[in-house]
């Protein structure tokens, strides 16, 4: 299979309009970060109980999706599936872009971004956060080398070895991100070993949904052929990942329901008791119904499963459902009161024993959307500068075996 790669021209009004709109969102995000740093975090919805707010929802989502976006490249190199090889370059690019956008949000939400230097030079190896800094920087370096091996013909023979390293590293990264919550024993909504593998499967779903949208948009707007076989393969794989996330969510909640100590949190999230109405609605409507069941129906229905507009709609729903899932995990897990004295009712002037309230401010949302836009700006600029996209992904070129069978 000989695939020719070519940059996009990027001279049309549509290209510059896209770049301009994304740039405005990035500037809005930077402006929001500057305003929060200047005025202080009192202007946000965050408080002493909810210390990880809406920016962390966007940031963790993008970091998790960055690992999943690399899955296409891993399938092509590690598992030797040649049908995915033409997409491997774009997969690596999108992984770096999503990780950069997520880390941009995290750094700018620190209030004092310069304090990151301390975290990068002084390590506490008992802290999962310290390990994650190493994992994030490592992924940047490894994926950059991986893309180099794929683009430089002389080094193609090393791409599978580097791809194996990238595959293992990204699994470690997503495991580390999930372990941030799994290791927090003080919170009833966290404190679960299943958090780590659940985040790994979530990364597959979120990353592939974004990848499919970027792929279809890139080929539609640049007027390049994109065969049905490639889209169908990615669509079916996305459905498997979405179902996998549902399985892990079910296992997580069934395990919690078995343990008496978690019954209060499960009633809070699943039934909306004790002030958990917003989180219960986001879980059932946002995550389960709109973010999982409806996309599965659209992906596997014999009519909508062949319609690219509906596939794009299903991918958008999966992304929104993923954000809802992150919101219930990160915000809901903090809002539920900590069980400082199990079996006892706790009350104090500080608000102990009371469900914490949180309403995301416009500044937080602007920063989160700005990070998302930064990821897309990187992709938009990179495909114009370097040859990440095959010039033809029609069935006859990208999947000749399927094309010959259909004829």
Image: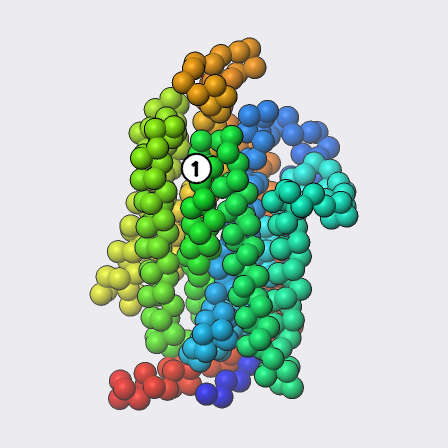
Q: Is residue 53 found left or right of 75 in the rendered image?
A: right
In front: 72, or 181?
181
Q: Position of residue 157 (x, y in %)?
A: 59, 83
Q: Residue at x 48, y 19 (%)?
A: 341
Q: Quadrant of residue 387?
A: bottom right
Q: Position of residue 325 (x, y in %)?
A: 42, 43
In front: 178, or 217?
178
In the rendered image of this protein, does residue 173 appear above or below residue 334? Answer: below
Local crowd at mark 1 within 10 Å, few (<14), some, or many (≥20)? Answer: many
Q: Position of residue 232 (x, y in %)?
A: 33, 70
In the rendered image of this protein, does residue 182 appear above or below residue 396? Answer: above
Question: Quick one: SS at disc 1?
Answer: helix
Q: Is residue 25 found left or right of 243 in the rendered image?
A: right
Q: Residue at x 34, y 28 (%)?
A: 260
Q: How many marks?
A: 1
Q: Residue at x 49, y 41 (%)?
A: 182
Does the rendering let one see residue 35?
Answer: no
Q: Position of residue 248 (x, y in %)?
A: 36, 49
Q: Is residue 241 found left or right of 104 in the rendered image?
A: left
In front: 220, or 137?
137
Q: Residue at x 53, y 66 (%)?
A: 167
Determine which residue is flagged by label 1.
328
Quadrant assignment for the C terminus = bottom left
């Amino acid at each position: 299979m000989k695939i020719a790669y070519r940059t996009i021209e990027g001279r049309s009004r549509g290209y510059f309009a896209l770049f301009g709109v994304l740039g405005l969102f990035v500037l809005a995000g930077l402006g929001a970060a500057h305003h929060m740093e200047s005025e202080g975090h009192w202007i946000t919805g965050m408080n002493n109980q909810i210390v990880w707010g809406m920016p962390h929802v966007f940031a963790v989502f993008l970091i998790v999706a960055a690992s999943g976006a690399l899955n296409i490249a891993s399938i092509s190199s590690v598992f030797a599936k040649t049908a995915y090889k033409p997409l491997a370059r774009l997969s690596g690019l999108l992984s770096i872009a999503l990780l950069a956008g997520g880390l941009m949000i995290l750094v700018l939400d620190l209030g004092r971004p310069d304090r990151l230097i301390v975290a990068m030079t002084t390590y506490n190896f008992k802290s999962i956060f310290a390990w994650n800094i190493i994992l994030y920087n490592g992924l940047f370096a490894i994926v950059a080398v991986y893309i180099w091996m794929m683009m430089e013909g002389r080094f193609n023979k090393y791409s599978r070895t580097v791809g194996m390293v990238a595959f293992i590293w990204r699994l470690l990264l997503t495991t580390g991100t999930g372990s941030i919550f799994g290791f927090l024993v003080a919170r009833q909504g966290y404190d679960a070993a299943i958090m780590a593998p659940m985040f790994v499967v979530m990364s597959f779903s979120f990353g592939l949904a974004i990848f499919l949208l970027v792929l279809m948009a890139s080929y539609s707007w640049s007027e390049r052929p994109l065969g049905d076989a490639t889209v169908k393969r990615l669509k079916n794989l996305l459905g498997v990942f979405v179902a996998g996330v549902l399985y892990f969510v079910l296992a997580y909640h069934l395990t919690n329901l078995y343990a008496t100590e978690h019954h209060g949190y499960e009633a809070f999230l699943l039934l909306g008791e004790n002030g958990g109405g917003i989180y219960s609605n986001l879980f059932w409507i946002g995550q389960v119904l709109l973010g999982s069941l409806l996309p599965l129906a659209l992906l596997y229905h014999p009519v909508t499963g062949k319609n690219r507009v509906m596939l794009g709609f299903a991918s958008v729903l999966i992304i929104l459902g993923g954000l809802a899932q992150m919101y219930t995990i990160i915000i809901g897990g903090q809002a539920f009161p900590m069980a400082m004295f199990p079996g006892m009712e706790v009350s104090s002037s500080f608000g102990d024993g009371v469900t914490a309230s949180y309403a995301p401010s416009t500044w937080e949302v602007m920063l989160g959307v700005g990070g998302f836009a930064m990821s897309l700006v990187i992709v938009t600029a990179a495909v114009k500068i370097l040859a990440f996209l095959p010039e033809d992904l029609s069935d006859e070129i990208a999947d000749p075996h399927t094309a010959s069978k259909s004829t």
